[in-house]
Image: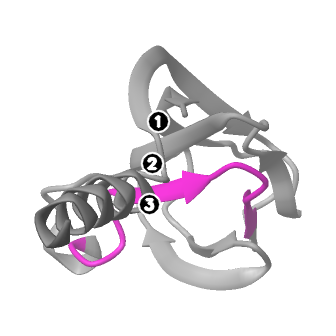
């Protein structure tokens, strides 16, 4: 009886630990913007998660990017990637469903592109 309770407990706990679901690749996406300030430009759809790997801009000026209205990093110059030492702690980052991504301080007449992978969350 004791071993049966142990086995049931292990099965139950393993189900709880896997509660986040499995990720299935859906698509590569380009999140493009050209407004000066857009702190909540994009929202991750329900049932999805994004892995944002890098960003690029047409300006040499610095501007900030935000996740859920909180500053996550500073983009300074045309290309920011996972290999750029200045942003090693910012990219890549994951955004769960309902999260917002945006930026503030983009120079007028310029644009920014965030490069991301979208995954389906399968329960």
Q: Is residue 116 above or below residue 67?
A: above
**Mark number for residue 115?**
1
- The answer to whether mark 2 and mark 3 are in CB contact below 8 A is no
Residue 25 x, y percent position in the rendering: 40, 19
The crowd level at tag 1 (other Cα within 10 Å; few <14, some 14-19, many 20+) is some
Which SS class for mark 2?
Answer: strand
Q: Which mark is first along the chain, 3 or 2?
A: 3
Left/right placement of residue 82 relative to residue 48 reads left
Name the front one of labels 1 and 3.
Answer: 3
- The answer to whether mark 2 and mark 1 are in CB contact below 8 A is yes
Residue 44 lies in what quarter of the image?
top right
- Whole-angstrom CA distance, mark 1 to mark 3, is 33 Å
Instruction: State the extent of the magenta-drawn residues as a range.
Output: 88-103
Q: Is residue 35 above or below residue 70?
A: above
- The answer to whether mark 1 and mark 3 are in CB contact below 8 A is no
Q: Please name the residue that numbered disc 3 is placed on.
A: 16
Q: Please name the residue that numbered disc 2 is placed on.
A: 55
Task: Name the image quarter holding the C terminus.
Answer: top right
Left/right placement of residue 33 relative to residue 22 reads right
**Residue 29 on the magenta segment:** no
Q: Which mark is first along the chain, 3 or 1?
A: 3
- Whole-angstrom CA distance, mark 2 to mark 3, is 36 Å
Residue 104 x, y percent position in the rendering: 77, 72
Identify the residue at image location x=23%, y=78%.
86
30, 56: nearer the viewer: 30
Identify the residue at image location x=56%, y=42%.
49
Identify the residue at image location x=20%, y=65%.
1
Q: Is residue 41 above or below residue 87?
A: above
């Amino acid at each position: 009886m004791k071993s049966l309770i142990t086995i049931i407990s292990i099965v139950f706990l393993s189900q709880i630990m896997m509660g986040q679901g499995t990720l299935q690749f859906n698509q590569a996406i380009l999140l493009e913007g050209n407004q000066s300030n857009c702190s909540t430009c994009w929202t991750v759809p329900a049932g999805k998660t994004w892995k944002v790997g890098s960003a690029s801009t047409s300006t040499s000026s610095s501007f900030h990017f935000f996740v859920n209205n909180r500053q996550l990093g500073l983009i300074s110059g045309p290309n920011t990637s996972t290999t750029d030492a200045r942003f090693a702690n910012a990219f890549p980052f994951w955004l769960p469903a309902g999260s917002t991504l945006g930026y503030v301080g983009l120079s007028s007449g310029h644009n920014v592109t965030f490069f991301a992978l979208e995954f389906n969350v399968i329960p």
